[in-house]
Amino acid sequence: MRAMVLHAPGAPLKAAELPDPEPQPGQALLRVLACGVCRTDLHVVDGELAHPKLPLVPGHEIVAEVVASAGRFAPGDHVGVPWLGWTCGECRYCLTGHENLCDRARFTGYDLDGGYAELCAADERFCFPLPVSLGAVEAAPLLCAGLIGYRSLRLAGDAARVGLYGFGAAAHIVCQVAVHEGREVYALTRPGDVEAQAFARSLGATWAGDTAEGPPVELDAAILYAPAGELVPTALAHVRKGGVVVCAGIHMSDIPSFRYELLWGERVVRSVANLTRADGEHFLALAPKVPVRTHVEPVPLARANEALARLRAGAVRGALVLVP
């Protein structure tokens, strides 16, 4: 099979012909139809997430057709493969509904070969059934940007006024869900990014501006999708007393010191770690009711490095999706 392979952190991916994967017990063999390009892929490739499996086929926003199944699916079924690829099922976290925190968890496109390839193998327990009618390219960003975005919105509580900091793949999905739920969305971008601000307004945001000017009202919650630690004190200054700042990325630059005054008033700063299968089931049932419309651009698999470079430069509206 054709694949794009990471051999060393910080190095470009290399095109390769690899043996077809051989499914292990409990795994399905999948033909990749589309794989989203996620910021987490960038963190893995750039070496910001330590100790990936090497060599590695990245990619964890996978929409695929079942070739062979261990029993859960039938050949021809469409499934989604997310970041969470395996958990132990027996630790304190797995047994209390927090499998996203499993110390032994294995992740697709990090510990396990992912979807920057024509084929992949995945644990059937961690695959989500998808309707064949759902477009593969359009569905791919739902598998991480959508799922992690949904979890971050749930962790923001019942906030009526939600600020989204960084308006990329996750935020453009969460904006639609939040508006559907009757919330006001305030989109905050890097200064001067008027195109992203217009994009946010087109998806129903009440207001869109930049992080320097800040929102015109106090927020009940802020969700940070931009991996910039300096936005934590900025967001704290924008939320009301009792408000929450949710750091939604798996990696973030260092958070600078800030005055206790910004945290005082029972404000909360918390992170989002991975996802659970329950998150996936709930979100994938909700998405068609909104309905969530992903804004995607298909890119040939062989141009994966170009797609990562565009994401690194912030030159993406919505999401890029690799197509084998």
Image (spheres, rainbow, N blue to C red):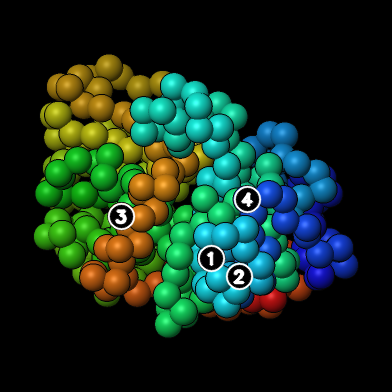
Image quarter of residue 275? top left
Q: Classify mark 4: helix, strand or loop.
A: loop
Calculate the distance from the C-alpha at mark 3 to the C-alpha at mark 2. Answer: 22 Å
Tag 3 residue: 282
Tag 4 residue: 26
Identify the residue at the far top of this view: 260
First-in-chain label (1 vs 3): 1
First-in-chain label (3 vs 2): 2
> Relative to 43, does residue 89 appear above or below in the rendering?
above
Q: Classify mark 3: helix, strand or loop.
A: helix
Q: Which mark is residue 73?
A: 1
Front of the two marks 3 and 2: 2
Determine the residue positioned at 42% across, 75% down: 131
Residue 197 in percent (x, y) is at 32, 66
Residue closer to the observer: 302 or 19? 19
Identify the residue at the far bottom of this view: 133
Badge 3 amino acid: His
Q: Quadrant of the C terminus?
A: bottom right
Badge 4 amino acid: Gly
Mark 4, Cα crowd under 10 Å, few <14 / some 14-19 / many 20+, is some
Answer yes or no: do the residues labelled 2 and 4 have beta carbons within 8 Å? Answer: no
Badge 1 amino acid: Phe
